[in-house]
Amino acid sequence: MSTTAVTPLTTADAETLVTAARTAAGAAGVAVSVTVLDAGGHLLAFRRDDRAVLISGETSTRKAYTALQLNAPTADLVDLVKPDGPFHSLPTALDRPLLFIAGGVPVHRDGRLIGALGIGGGAPEQDHGFATAALRELAG
């Protein structure tokens, strides 16, 4: 059985994601924070616009972490943590910085999880849109 190595998320990739997310947010007139994590959950890049609300730095990081750990866009997870959802107790059961609000997306290369991107500062739907625009730019 042969295995093909997948190139990890690089700092250049992270900068591409940050720039593309900030460009998309800027076009919408929204000040954001952008967090990029590698596959191990380590910070590769972070940027908070001067006008972004301070908490957006924390929310962008938690969204990225949640997308990474569950390998799913946070927008797809929101209903799972509602009172009648199967993951209702997950946010409090683990001592981890999970945040089930749209704006976090996993980053894949050749079908493998290589990191995650989180955006905070806009409405959740906006943040998700900025994140997916950045993924499209990275995919080129």
Image (cartoon, helix red, strand yellow):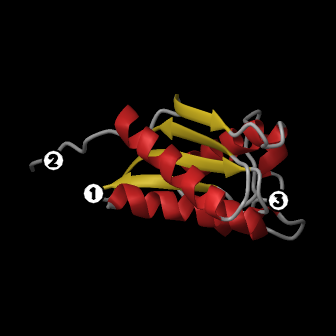
* Dot 3 alpha-carbon crowd within 10 angstroms: few under 14, some 14 to 19, many 20 or more: some
Residue under numbered circle 2: 4
- Of all residues, the one furthest to the right in this rendering is 83
What crowding class fits label 2: few (fewer than 14 Cα within 10 Å), some (14-19), or many (20 or more)?
few
- Residue 10 can be seen, yes or no: no
**Residue 11 visible from this viewpoint:** yes
Among numbered discs 1 and 2, the one appearing first in the sequence: 2
Q: Is residue 55 left or right of residue 67?
A: right
Element at label 3: loop
Which residue occupies 62% across, 35% down? 47
Disc 2, SS: loop
| Residue type (three-letter) at the residue carrying disc 2 | Thr
Name the kind of residue labelled 3 in the image: His
**Pointer 2 and pointer 3: residues touching (CB < 8 Å)?**
no
Q: Residue furthest left?
A: 2
Q: Nearer the viewer, mark 2 or mark 3?
A: 2
Nearer the observer, 22 or 8: 22
Q: Which residue is labeled 3 in the image?
A: 88
The picture quadrant where one finds residue 48 is top right
Tell me how far mark 1 sits from mark 3, CA to CA: 32 Å
Quick check: marks 1 and 2 in contact, CB under 8 Å?
yes
Looking at the rendering, which quadrant does residue 5 occupy? top left
| Disc sitting over residue 110 in the figure | 1
Q: Residue 58's image quarter?
A: top right
The amino acid type of the residue labelled 1 equals: Asp
